[in-house]
Amino acid sequence: MSQEIAVVGSPEFTTGFRLAGVRKFENVPDNEKDERLDDAVERTLDDEGTGIIVMHDDDLDHLSRGTRDAVEGSIEPVLVTLGGSGAGSGGLRDQIKRAIGIDLMEEDD
């Protein structure tokens, strides 16, 4: 079974991904994130057809501790965050390492 990318966030965030062909998304307006983001993320985590969840890094602050721990610790689907402080090479490096199990950027001495 092939898995797809799912995007969770504000309509402004998800629109670009939808235009690029991403079919799975959860729109949560900015003014409703504290109330609705947990449910949207949990639905996406429970979807067996999802292999990657894309979110804006700042949206993690709106998640409850339990949902945040679940999504950050998930191996399948794996979480990829964009923007904010987690977008640096260290954050992306850690996300890739968690997703595939090896450090592709590790330098040999």
Image (tube, grey):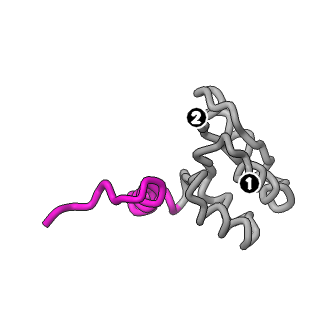
| Residue 13 appears in the figure | no
Residue 4 coordinates in the image, percent (x, y): 61, 37
Horizontally, is 75 left or right of 70 in the view? left
Horizontally, is 103 left or right of 85 in the view? left
Task: Tell me how far mark 1 sits from mark 2, CA to CA.
Answer: 20 Å
Please report the residue visible at 56 percent of the width from the left and 58 percent of the height from the top: 75
Residue 72 coordinates in the image, percent (x, y): 60, 64
Span of residues in magenta: 85-109
**Which of the labelled discs sits on residue 41, or is there none?**
1
Q: State which quarter of the image contains the N terminus.
A: top right
Residue 93 coordinates in the image, percent (x, y): 40, 58
Say whether residue 108 is magenta.
yes
Against 9, residue 67 (above or below) is below
Q: Earlier in the sequence, mark 1 or mark 2?
A: 2
Q: Dot 1 lies on which element?
A: helix
Please report the residue visible at 43 percent of the width from the left and 62 percent of the height from the top: 94
Q: Give the labeled residue for mark 2.
A: 2
| Residue 70 appears in the figure | yes
